[in-house]
């Protein structure tokens, strides 16, 4: 069973950003989960809380496709919905086609950018997301799931990647 992101989650870790400079082209990444429709978000009972999956340190950013560097393209935004299994492994990723969220139609970008983003997220690992179910009617733990029962859940998260270069050098800009 695959569940999507909880809308009311107050904190939300995202994969560590890697900022490097050089002629190889760089990528910025950020989570855009709050842009997912409410109908696709997990619904919790009054006696449940939710813990987002935590990205493992060292998850790689996509690489700017080397064959596209010479074209000096304008910034390219790629948005992916990333399915994360109960074990924290990425099960799949698919481009998001939602102009309202700032995600261009995949047909408007070079497919090599989409491929680069999908190749990177396929390597990502997370501490799994979990639902904490408490025996009473209300959650009682301030942090963690000390008095409840953890149930690992599969989730989908959305990420925005911005591939850009300027004056022949790669740069990083977090997606909008």
Image (cartoon, rainbow, N blue to C red):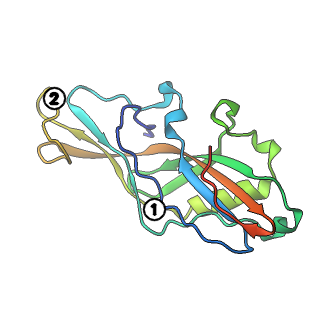
**Which percent across, then down, holds residue 158?**
55, 44
Q: Residue 158 vs residue 144: left or right?
A: right
**Which percent across, then down, holds residue 7?**
41, 32
Q: Which residue is identified by label 1? A: 125
Q: Residue 132 vs residue 8: left or right?
A: left
Q: Marks 1 and 2, how far apart in space?
A: 31 Å
Does 61 sit above or below residue 154? below
Query: Which corner quadrant of the image does residue 114 belong to?
Result: bottom right
Does 107 sit above or below residue 69? above
Q: Which residue is identified by label 2? A: 138
**Which percent across, then down, holds residue 112?**
77, 59
The N terminus: image quadrant: top left
Crowd class of label 2 (few under 14; some 14 to 19; many from 20; radius 10 Å): few
**Which percent across, then down, holds residue 29?**
58, 54
First in residue order: circle 1 vs circle 2: 1
Q: Residue at x 50, y 65 (%)?
A: 59
Crowd class of label 1 (few under 14; some 14 to 19; many from 20; radius 10 Å): many
């Amino acid at each position: 069973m695959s569940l999507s992101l909880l809308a009311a989650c107050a904190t939300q870790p995202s994969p560590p950003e890697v900022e490097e400079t050089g002629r190889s082209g760089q990528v910025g990444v950020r989570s855009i989960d709050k842009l997912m429709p409410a109908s696709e978000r997990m619904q919790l009972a009054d006696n449940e809380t939710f813990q987002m999956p935590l990205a493992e340190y060292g998850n790689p950013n996509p690489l700017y496709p080397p064959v596209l560097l010479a074209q000096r393209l304008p910034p390219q935004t790629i948005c992916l919905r990333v399915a994360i299994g109960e074990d924290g492994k990425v099960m799949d990723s698919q481009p998001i086609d939602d102009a309202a969220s700032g995600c261009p139609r995949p047909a408007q970008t070079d497919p090599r950018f989409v491929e680069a983003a999908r190749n990177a997220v396929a390597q990502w690992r997370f501490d799994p997301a979990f639902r904490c179910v408490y025996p009473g009617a209300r959650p009682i733990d301030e942090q963690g799931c000390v008095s409840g029962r953890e149930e690992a859940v599969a989730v989908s998260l959305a990420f925005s990647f911005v591939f850009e270069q300027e004056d022949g050098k790669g740069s990083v800009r977090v997606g909008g």
